[in-house]
Image (spheres, helix red, strand yellow):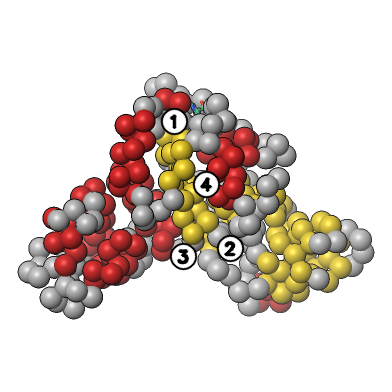
Amino acid sequence: MEGTIIKGVGGFYYVKTAEGMFQCKARGIFRKENKTPCVGDLVNIKPLNEEEAVITGIFPRRNQFIRPPVANVDCLIITIAMKNPEPDLYTIDKFLVMAEYHHTDIGICLNKIDLSGRGEIDGFHKIYDGIYPVIGVSGKSGEGVSGLREFMSKRKCAFAGPSGVGKSTLLNRLEKTVVAETGEISAKLQRGKHTTRHVELFELTGGGMVFDTPGFSSFELPDAGEQELAFLFPEMVHFIGLCKFKNCRHISEPGCAIRKAAEEGAIHESRYGSYCRQLKEIHEMRKY
Ligand SMILES: Nc1nc2c(ncn2[C@@H]2O[C@H](COP(=O)(O)OP(=O)(O)O)[C@@H](O)[C@H]2O)c(=O)[nH]1
Ligand SMILES: [Mg+2]
Ligand SMILES: [Zn+2]
């Protein structure tokens, strides 16, 4: 029987199947093979009775994250707030690179549109339209949430983004059975409190599933080489082969097609700026 691991607690895995939920132990051999079942895994189970089963196999994963420990994320929804906290383009682009690195589908969710004007929202569309879907919502008023729900249907999604942008609030809006705590932003620190501690996968009423996690980090720079970074910016990919030098890093090399595209506006300057800054960070990190 096949199912999906939706929760792991105290050595037990909760596996949702067409026949209902099973509380499972993992087959002993996994430990020997250094395999650990993970929330999001598609697994084979062998029922012992109507409620208990043994996980006998783990299907190959689309991707796997260490922090939070989840697998098979189909789509990462990079969430930012229009205000409070102020959006930071470099942080957004780092989350996007992290998502690309894990081969997920990607959407950008602009939350708290109740706090901003049309002009600010359009500014994000100017940068990201044609690269990623941009969905404006208000977790507070509910505006745009039906569009978000539609975007999330048919796949396993997770929200990623800085604290305080409203990820838990949106989770609560989407599905009544999800009970993520929302934290008021601490006035002093201007960042949300960490309130979600476990990892769990919930079904959405409109189809699809959503991971509730303590949060994804944008800080783990991909352990990609400097040459690979441009491949994680989709709008740069088709220029890469056009550079004069094969090992071009797209900074100051003569005949660089990417820098030229940025100068001509075919690649947005803020995206090219994020690329250069992240390349530098990777370079600095590799020095040690
Ligand atoms: N004005 C406004 N506030 C929001 C919205 N969504 C969330 N908030 C508030 O932002 C704060 C942080 O939300 P939370 O969901 O805990 O953020 P998280 O850290 O990303 O999970 C809370 O005080 C929410 O009430 C929104 O759409 N508009
Ligand atoms: Mg939260
Ligand atoms: Zn180049």
User: Which mark, by number, is residue 103?
Assistant: 3
Give the residue drawn at x 49%, y 59%.
105
- C-alpha separation, residue under disc 2 versus residue under disc 4: 14 Å
Whether label 4 lies within 8 Å of ligand 1 gets the answer: yes
Q: Earlier in the sequence, mark 1 or mark 2?
A: 2
Residue 239 lies, in percent from the top left, at 23, 69
Q: Residue furthest top?
A: 187
Is there a contact, CB below 8 Å, between mark 1 and mark 2? no
The percent coordinates of residue 96 (x first, y second) are: 39, 54
Pointer 4 with pointer 3, Cβ within 8 A: no
Q: Amino acid at mark 1?
A: Ile
Disc with the residue nearer the chain's start (4 vs 3): 3
* Residue with the mark numbered 4: 159
Query: Which residue is tagged 2?
Result: 72
Nearest-to-viewer mark from 1 and 3: 1
Q: Which residue is mark 1?
A: 113
Q: Is residue 15 left or right of residue 90?
A: right
Which image quarter is the C terminus in?
bottom left
